[in-house]
Amino acid sequence: MQPRNIILFDSLAGLSVGIASILIYPFIAELHNWTPEFALYVAMVNLGYGCYSGILTLIYRKTTRGLLPLVVLLIIANSAWTGQCLTQIWYISSTSNWTGVGHLLMEAVFVGVLAFVEAVVVLPALRKGTSGQSI
């Protein structure tokens, strides 16, 4: 998988989950036994995250100059959100149901794997100066 496509996948995942979750956050809250505010918070973080990685995708189309620190920030954000999801599992486990815990667990695994893949594939490509684009 090319580095640029990894960041594009990251963006599309965040945007699609964020938009869908915003549209149905009351249903998600009821399904998972979350507060509507918490369901909206999770949705907004996904949307914001998808926007940020989308901006990186657009930059990557033109140049890789200056992109390395922005991708490092993306990896840090992925890792932080993984930790946040795992922390929330502990925090809401007494009030949420298995679907809510499962939702956060799957999100933590998904975003954690993305952080790992970006660190192992995208960062080395940026350090070498290859953009993952065919010439």
Image (cartoon, rainbow, N blue to C red):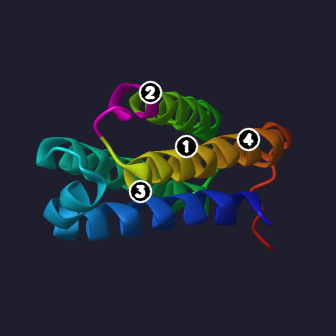
Which is in the foreground here, disc 1 or disc 2? 2
Identify the mark at residue 108; answer none if there is no mark: 1
Q: Amino acid at mark 4?
A: Phe
In the rendered structure, the answer to whether residue 37 lies left or right of residue 4 reads left
Residue located beneath label 4 in the image = 116
In the rendered structure, the answer to whether residue 10 lies left or right of residue 20 reads right
Q: Amino acid at mark 3?
A: Thr
Identify the mark at residue 99; answer none if there is no mark: 3
Q: CA distance from mark 4 to mark 3?
A: 25 Å
Which is in the foreground here, disc 3 or disc 1? 3
Label 3 crowd (10 A; few <14 / some 14-19 / many >=20)? few
Nearer-N-terminus badge (1/2): 2
Residues at marks 1 and 2 touching, judged by CB atoms closer than 8 Å: no
Label 2 crowd (10 A; few <14 / some 14-19 / many >=20)? few
In the rendered structure, the answer to whether residue 30 lies left or right of residue 59 reads left
Q: Where in the figure is residue 33, as x and y percent of width and height? A: 24, 50
Per the rendered image, the range of residues in magenta is: 89-95
Q: CA distance from mark 3 to mark 1?
A: 14 Å
Identify the residue shown where x is 81% and y is 52%. Answer: 130
Residue located beneath label 2 in the image = 90
State the residue in front, 18 or 123.
18
Q: Where in the figure is residue 104, as x and y percent of width and height? A: 46, 46
